[in-house]
Amino acid sequence: MNFLKLEDTPSGPFMDQDTKELYKKNLRSQPDDWRYRNKLVKYTLNTHNYRTKEFNIIPWADSVVIFGCSFVFGIGAALDETIAAQLSSIIQKPVINMGAPGTSAMFSLYNSSILRKDCPKPAGIVFGWTASSRCTLFLKDSMVHCGSWMEDVGGLGKAWRRFDDNASMHLKFTRQCAQQMWDDVPYADFTLFPSNRSVIDCQYIRQVDYGRDCCHSGVETNRQVAVAIAEQLNL
């Protein structure tokens, strides 16, 4: 499958901002009963660097596919704590994690269009909408995921965020395109970003705990998201 390929990242115990150095710092600052003193977190990636099985062995027609950013990917979360894993446990179907750290809403939409074109129709589709301030810059041999943490060489990210209305309108239309693209499939969406509450009318879920990096959502937040998705899909 020709899904958008993520930056090469080795599988292992640390990834993105969930670094070994941060973990050591958190060990000193967190209470004695902190979940991640003993909970193993490991990032096992496929050849496209997604946190899921190799695309050619996935039973797409029997699976629910979830798109989103690092919250869906599960930075700071053990595999069984991710939204995808907990949703799979609830609905008793495979859930394919197409979350990609740092990415934009348009990145999720474009990947879902590849799924629509190249794969059997899935059992369900889910979008976790990220902040509207993010955008994707395509270069000849790479992509830049533009956000407040990074300015690209062309200045697209800074220009994108200059006017709030620009980013907001793009997110509204991106969601509308996603809904239209998948109008014949059980569909669910949500956001964990408070800034999106005034932009799109999908379900907002407040973050109530944190993963190992003490930033991204933890096991209970992800459980609440999974429950909300299952109710929307109604499979």
Image (cartoon, rainbow, N blue to C red):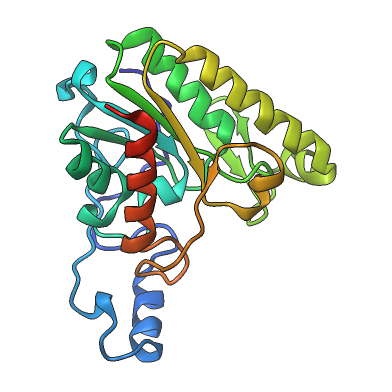
User: Which of the pair 90/17 is nearer the observer?
Assistant: 90
| Quadrant of the image containing the C terminus | top left
Q: Residue at x 45, y 66 (%)?
A: 208
Q: Residue at x 44, y 22 (%)?
A: 112
Q: Is residue 161 left or right of residue 7?
A: right
User: Which of the pair 98/15 is nearer the observer?
Assistant: 98
Is residue 73 in sight in this rendering? yes
User: Which of the pair 157/79 is nearer the observer?
Assistant: 79
Q: Using the image, determine if residue 110 lies above or below residue 31.
A: above
Q: Residue at x 39, y 12 (%)?
A: 116
Q: Position of residue 93 (x, y in %)?
A: 18, 32
User: Which of the pair 169/11 is nearer the observer?
Assistant: 169
Q: Using the image, determine if residue 43 lies above or below residue 220.
A: above
Residue most extreme to the right? 163
Q: Is residue 163 left or right of residue 210?
A: right
| Quadrant of the image containing the N terminus | top left
Q: Using the image, determine if residue 75 lies above or below residue 162.
A: below
Q: Position of residue 114 (x, y in %)?
A: 42, 16
Q: Position of residue 172 (x, y in %)?
A: 67, 29
Q: Is residue 158 left or right of residue 31?
A: right
Q: Residue at x 27, y 20 (%)?
A: 123
